Amino acid sequence: QPMVKRALCVGINKYPRPDLELRGCCDNLGHIGKLISVFASWGDSVDHHRAMTQKYPTSGRAWFNLGYAALQDRDFPTAIAAYRKTLDLGYRAGTSSYNMACAYALQGDKNAAFDWLERAKAAKFEVEDHIFSDDDLDSLRDDPRWDKFTEGMERHKKNGFAYSYKYGNKKDS
């Protein structure tokens, strides 16, 4: 656990400017996620990022990272509130909207999930890069709105695979 806590806290009180502190602290949250899952808990990360939002309440980056950590911890009220604040601050609207869709889908609120997917698409988030491989959205796949939403997302190359989005199959490229 000490290694992970150090990874979470790189840069705390080290940098003279908030943007540099948050960059040193929070840029690699997605990359250190595996470490967090193995050696600590996402709850520790939520606590850390909540403290960052208190220290930097107008930082979209801080709120976004709180939302991400809370979503991983399955703390949906915290994730949704953090992403709403991120959107209020105008930070990463597309990704925040997509993650809101994930939070709602994981709770079984299909109406809100589809609404937020539409918002993510409208904000120019590349939904087709994520939607078919993201198990957070599994609860939406049997809904009739899924086919309508994914219409036209035929094939897309990513990470060495060609995804057949119509059927959700990975095929070697």
Image (cartoon, rainbow, N blue to C red):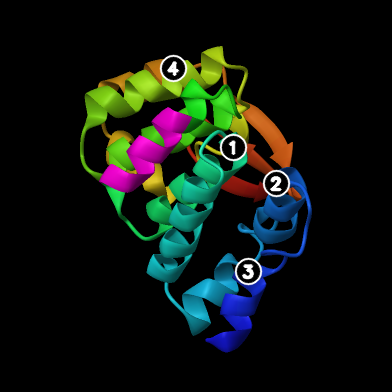
Mark 3 to mark 4 CA distance (whole Å): 35 Å
Q: Earlier in the sequence, mark 2 or mark 1?
A: 2
Q: Which residue is mark 3?
A: 9
Reply above or below: 91 against 40: above
Q: What amino acid is at disc 1?
A: Ser
Q: Main secondary structure of the magenta part?
A: helix
Q: Are marks 2 and 1 in contact (CB under 8 Å)?
A: yes
Pointer 3 or 1: first along the chain: 3
Mark 2 sits on what residue? 18
Q: Position of residue 17 (x, y in %)?
A: 76, 47
Q: Is residue 148 left or right of residue 93?
A: left
Whichever of callouts 3 and 4 sits on the residue coming sooner in the sequence is: 3
Residue 101: x percent and y percent?
A: 38, 32
Amino acid on which disc 4 is placed: Glu
> Quadrant of residue 99 in the image?
top left
Q: What is the CA distance from the residue labelled 1 to the residue labelled 4?
A: 25 Å
Local SS, label 2: helix
Residue at 76 percent across and 64 percent down: it is: 14
Nearer the observer: mark 1 or 4; the answer is 1
Ranked by sequence position, the earlier of labels 1 and 4 is 1
Nearest to the eye among marks 2 and 4: give it.
2
Task: Give the secondary structure at mark 1.
Answer: loop
For residue 10, side relative to residue 151 (left or right):
right
Q: Earlier in the sequence, mark 2 or mark 4?
A: 2
Asked whether the residues under the numbered discs 3 and 4 touch, taking CB atoms below 8 Å apart as contact, a structural biologist would say no
Is residue 102 at least partly visible in the picture?
Answer: no
In 3D space, how far apart are the residues under numbered discs 2 and 1 (Cα atoms)? Answer: 9 Å
Q: Are marks 1 and 4 in contact (CB under 8 Å)?
A: no
Amino acid type at image mark 2: Pro
* Range drawn in magenta: 77-85
